Amino acid sequence: MTASIERFLERHRRIALDTSVVIYAVEANPKYFNLASRIFSWLESDGNAVTSTLAMTEALVRPYRLADIKTVDKFYSFLLTYPHLEWIEPTLHIADRAAQIRAEHNLRTPDAIQAATAIVSGATALISNDPVFRRIEFLKVLLLDEML
């Protein structure tokens, strides 16, 4: 498990993180925490990653719905101060690329924005747990479920 994810991370100068990876790390999901933890350890050393600010929107829905402000604060304190993780705001360029991806690959808008963010910001890979990203042939996708 760890060796496979290590090899994947070594092959990429810059990766993109989907929302699920962020949630697994912050909420210490028992099934995926070891993998998510390894990714964030890589970021602490020499890794480089991007994610859309849309990931924060998606990640905070559940804590806000539950009025769990402690978890909201945990997301902010963990993610906004994390080294080598760049939060990319949707721009017109990203929106245009997301529309192209959505049209060509039939992705939902949030997924298309994540993919476009990865591509526009120079990431060569995306880590997720959603196989829908495999539709994008020019983006190498690692699914955490396949690493278990």
Image (cartoon, rainbow, N blue to C red):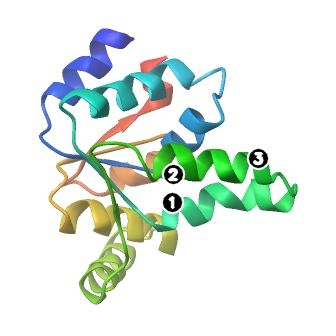
Distance from disc 2 to disc 3, alpha carbons, whole Å, reads 19 Å
Q: Quadrant of residue 135?
A: bottom left
Does residue 145 lie above or below 118 as drawn?
above
Please give the residue where the numbered disc 1 appears in the rendered image: 55
- At label 2, counting other C-alpha atoms closer than 10 Å, the crowd grade (few under 14, some 14-19, many 20 or more) is many
Total numbered badges shown on the rendered structure = 3
Q: Nearer the viewer, residue 10 or 84?
A: 84
Horizontal arrangement in the rendering, residue 9 relative to residue 20 (left or right): left
Q: Amino acid at mark 1?
A: Ala
Please give the residue where the numbered disc 3 appears in the rendered image: 70
Q: Whole-percent x and y of residue 30? A: 66, 21
Please give the residue where the numbered disc 2 appears in the rendered image: 19
**Residue in the picture at 59% in, 66% down:** 57
For label 2, the SS is helix
Q: Nearer the viewer, residue 75 or 104?
A: 75
Distance from disc 1 to disc 2, alpha carbons, whole Å, reads 5 Å
Query: Which mark is first along the chain, 1 or 3?
Result: 1
**Residue 122 got which mark?**
none
- Marks 3,1: beta carbons within 8 A: no
Please indicate, yes or no, whether residue 94 appears anywhere in the rendered image: yes
